Amino acid sequence: MRYRQLFILSLPGVLLLFVFSYMPLYGILLPFKDYKIDLGFWDSPWVGFDNFKYLFSQDAWRITRNTVLYNVAFIVVLLIVAVAFALMLNEMRRSSVKFYQTVLFLPYFLSFTVVSYIFLAMFDMEHGLVNTILEWFGKDAVLWYNDAKYWPPLLVLTYVWKNAGYYTIIYFTGLLGINEEYYEAARVDGASRWQLIKSISLPLLKPLIILMVLMQVGKIFVGNFDMFYQIPRDSSLLYATTDVIDTYVYRSLKSLGDIGMASAAGVYQSIVGLVLVLIVNGLIRKFDSENSVF
């Protein structure tokens, strides 16, 4: 067998993928059943699309809108920030890059539970740092946890602060893979730093950017549960702008105990995510076939 060593090397990953991703696929039937613990998975009665009807109730538009718009904002803002930081790291001396990598990457290791308490220390309505500073300047304290209008920019900034380091490292690694001879030849022709970035770095980084964006688009209907539940502290006053599909389903599951309905939400998110990936990749293939993923 010509590639036997590579096959053996990949076998643990393949087995892991098969056991945890393909074997549980029979669970896709669960959203179409009225699951009863005493009857079990196979003997629970079929209910057709009844579990999906709950998702498309009066709150469906709000939670779907919030989920999609937040994820679009995350993708766009995080892409701009991460690529900009990666380009800046690429321009630094290699001796100082490790320090800035560590500083950028550190927030990624913090759980959103920890971040929620940092956030509370900043924006607590009575003793938070931000309100304390506002009072020093003679301004009125802001009721952050009572007014939903403040939360879209706050959540976007929090998400970008936590994840920018991770994506920066990925894009910076992609920049390190660019042949240095391209830059040397351009410098000989008198190219400035901006011209090097515009004509060499960004075009050669584009395939990696497309791949990362496609991966994020696939999860555009999936809200980060830890973030949207922990940071707003599940305040009902903020549901207008902080409630996403995952938090809505969690509260519904907690109050109703309907496993079939929760499974229907997962299938809905997965199918729509797959369709969006196919659409975006199709558009990329149409306009720039060399950089499409498939």
Image: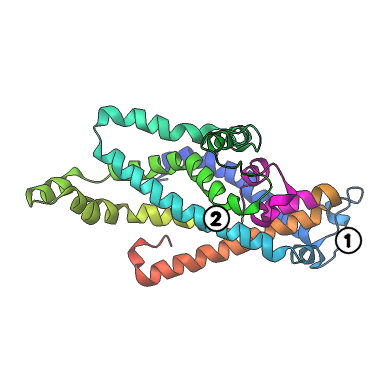
Q: Nearer the viewer, residue 144 or 229?
A: 144
The amino acid pointed to by label 2 is: Asn
Binning the other alpha carbons within 10 Å of mark 2 as few (below 14), some (14 to 19) or many (20 upward) gives many
Give the percent coordinates (x, y) of residue 172.
34, 42
Q: For residue 236: magenta?
A: yes
Q: Main secondary structure of the magenta part?
A: helix
Residue linked to disc 2: 71
Residue at x 59% of width, y 41% of height = 16
Q: Secondary structure at mark 2?
A: helix
Binning the other alpha carbons within 10 Å of mark 1 as few (below 14), some (14 to 19) or many (20 upward) gives some
Give the percent coordinates (x, y) of residue 191.
13, 51
Which quadrant would the C terminus be assigned to in this image? bottom left
Q: Nearer the viewer, residue 147 or 263?
A: 147
The amino acid pointed to by label 1 is: Pro
In the displayed structure, does residue 76 sit left or right of residue 147?
Answer: left
Give the percent coordinates (x, y) of residue 238.
68, 51
Magenta segment: 223-252
Residue 25 vs 10, above or below: the answer is below
> Of label 2 and label 1, which has the lower sequence position?
1
Residue linked to disc 1: 45
In the displayed structure, does residue 25 sit left or right of residue 254?
Answer: left
Residue 257 appearing in the image: no
